[in-house]
Image (tube, helix red, strand yellow):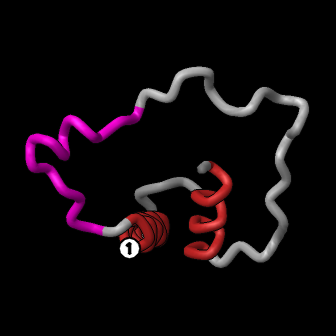
Amino acid sequence: SIRILADKISKVVGFKGKVEWDKSKPDGTFKKQLNVSRMKHLGWKARIPLEEGLKQAYSDFLISLQEGNIRG
């Protein structure tokens, strides 16, 4: 769920605040498009767990920010 993903990202980046949800908006999209079952059927398998991928992506972001490749 988006809530679980938000919690994982918050943990990786060290966010100590509270994530607030706008309950006046609909519950997500009407149709979810992401489905990897066909890819798995063809033999694809993720090599990096989600948490590790988030850590790597955040680390890369911080390095790029320090190098001036991203405006902060």
48 left or right, relative to 29: left
For numbered disc 1, what is the local secondary structure? helix
71 left or right, relative to 64: right
Compared to residue 37, the image places residue 57 above or below, namely below
Give the main secondary structure, helix, strand or loop, of the magenta stretch.
loop
For image coordinates 40% across by 34% down, the residue present is 34
User: Alpha-carbon neighbours of circle 1 within 10 Å: few (<14), some, or many (≥20)?
Assistant: few
Q: Amino acid at mark 1?
A: Glu
The single residue placed furthest to the top in the displayed view is: 30
The single residue placed furthest to the left in the displayed view is: 43
In this view, the residue in front, 39 or 63, is 39
47 left or right, relative to 3: left
Q: Quadrant of the C terminus?
A: bottom right
Residue topped by disc 1: 52
Tell me where residue 19 sits by quadrant: bottom right
For image coordinates 47% across by 68% down, the residue present is 58
User: For residue 44: magenta?
Assistant: yes
Residue 53 picture location, percent across and down: 37, 66
27 left or right, relative to 11: right
Tell me where residue 37 sits by quadrant: top left
Compared to residue 17, the image places residue 70 above or below, namely above
User: For residue 24: magenta?
Assistant: no
Compared to residue 45, the image places residue 65 above or below, namely below
Point out the stretch of residues depicted in magenta: 34-48
Residue 33 picture location, percent across and down: 43, 27
